[in-house]
Image: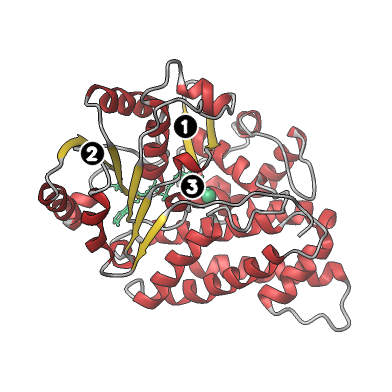
Amino acid sequence: MLGNFTYENPTRLHFGENSLEFLKEELAHYGQTVMLSYGGGSIKRTGLYDQIVAILKEAGKTIVEDPGVMPNPTVEKLYEGCKLARENNVDLILAVGGGSVCDYAKGVAASAWLDGDPWQTYYVEGNDPATDLRILPVGCVLTMVGTGSEMNGGSVISNHTQNLKLGKVFDSRLMPKFTILNPKLTFTVPQYQMVAGIFDIMSHLLEQYCSNEDDNTSDYLNEGLMRSLIHSSRIAVKNPQDYEARSNIMWTATWALNTLLKQGKRQDWMVHMIGHAIGVVTNATHGMTLASVSIPYYKYIMHSGLHQFVRFAKNVWNVRSEGKTDEEIALEGLASMEAWMREIGVTMKASELGVTPDNIETIADATVLGGGFMQLTREDVVEILKRAL
Ligand code: NZQ
Ligand code: ZN
């Protein structure tokens, strides 16, 4: 651990099939008016909406309804939520849904009382909220696993007019105050979304793993989480109702992106930057955008961080090293990852998500450049996208 850092994570987690029981006592810490933010209707179909409303009423709260948070939430929805929160002077935002609802809730929490444009202030310029700004508390009931939004300060918003999907990682003031993690609530997630979420977790792990030369505790923790994810995902795709597998995946997702693993690491994040650019152009599912570019991307950068790809092959995929060159070992590791991706059923081709030779340049323009082992140029992004088609 050669880096210097300050670590803090204030989110309280309630985990398990009885965890919704803790909602009422959490609500007691906040004022009268609760903005109930949710997505396109899955919580109404599953009956969770009725359960939450009953708990809110029992706690004597006034409910401000905020439905319709779409996957890949838009800046227009963010503005709408800010107006609603301010006009009703809400005391708590309760986000019930997946990463999109949680991300959106954090955006509203930071922006409802902001003078100025939150898109420009936070997402484009990357500023932090002023110390004297009123920030609304956020609580989450998670229904879809993958993003880690339940225990981090991340908030990703899409602006289709500007052709940009940008993430702001807020400080600990915007991390959810509490999150309810009940694995059973994820049983109704469609298989496509479940698998996309599983790959999102893998991507978060790998993108923190792919940087630095030093011997780092984060890498050992990371390998353990990757092994657990691979194991449980194989069970979950065959039997999505397997509680043990789904609960392990839920817990892995939270620890994959709750700010622990990144300490002391430079990190990579180029798969996410390209994935977000694909997302704003095609509106494809987040995890699938990542899956579609991952193998071409990692083959492209492999020689810049060969030692880590060798380690990944041996420690995560049990590749035997005797009589092989480092390059052969690393490639065997990536081949094992590719076989696992095909086994769980993620999208392997960007063309299946709407990426075409004609929009590759637009996607490259929308990609925020950076990297871990290798700093990517726009031309590198174009080349990776061509290989991903
Ligand atoms: O809108 P509803 O009707 O609720 O349906 C949702 C949505 O269509 C459905 N769903 C969720 N829970 C369900 C369910 N359907 C049935 N039963 C349930 N229990 O699933 C669909 C996808 O939901 P969404 O919230 O969009 O998915 P996800 O959790 O993958 O979130 C994606 C967003 O998070 C951002 C992504 O960019 C994307 O905008 N990310 C946030 C991050 C963070 N905060 O740190 C990091 C990630 O890398 C990611 O960028
Ligand atoms: Zn992600």
Which is more foreground, mark 3 or mark 2? 2
Give, as a three-letter code, the residue at label 3: His
Which residue matches tag 1?
158
Q: Does label 1 or label 2 sit earlier along the sequence?
A: 2
Q: Does label 3 or label 1 sit earlier along the sequence?
A: 1
Would the CB of label 3 be found within 8 Å of ligand 1? Answer: yes
Q: Position of residue 151 (x, y in %)?
A: 46, 52
Label annotation for residue 31:
2
How far is disc 3 from disc 1 in space, using C-alphas? 12 Å
The answer to which of 383 and 313 lies nearer the viewer is 313
How far is disc 3 from disc 2 in space, using C-alphas? 34 Å
At 28% from the left and 28% from the top, the residue drawn is 85
Q: Position of residue 232 (x, y in %)?
A: 48, 74
Q: Give the left or right position of residue 336, taking residue 307 as reference.
A: left
Q: Give the left or right position of residue 383, taking residue 197 as reference.
A: right
Instruction: Tell me if residue 162 can be seen.
Output: no
Q: Position of residue 76 (x, y in %)?
A: 37, 24
Which residue matches tag 3?
286
- Estimate how packed mark 2 is, as few (under 14), some (14 to 19) or many (20 or more) residues with alpha carbons within 10 Å: few
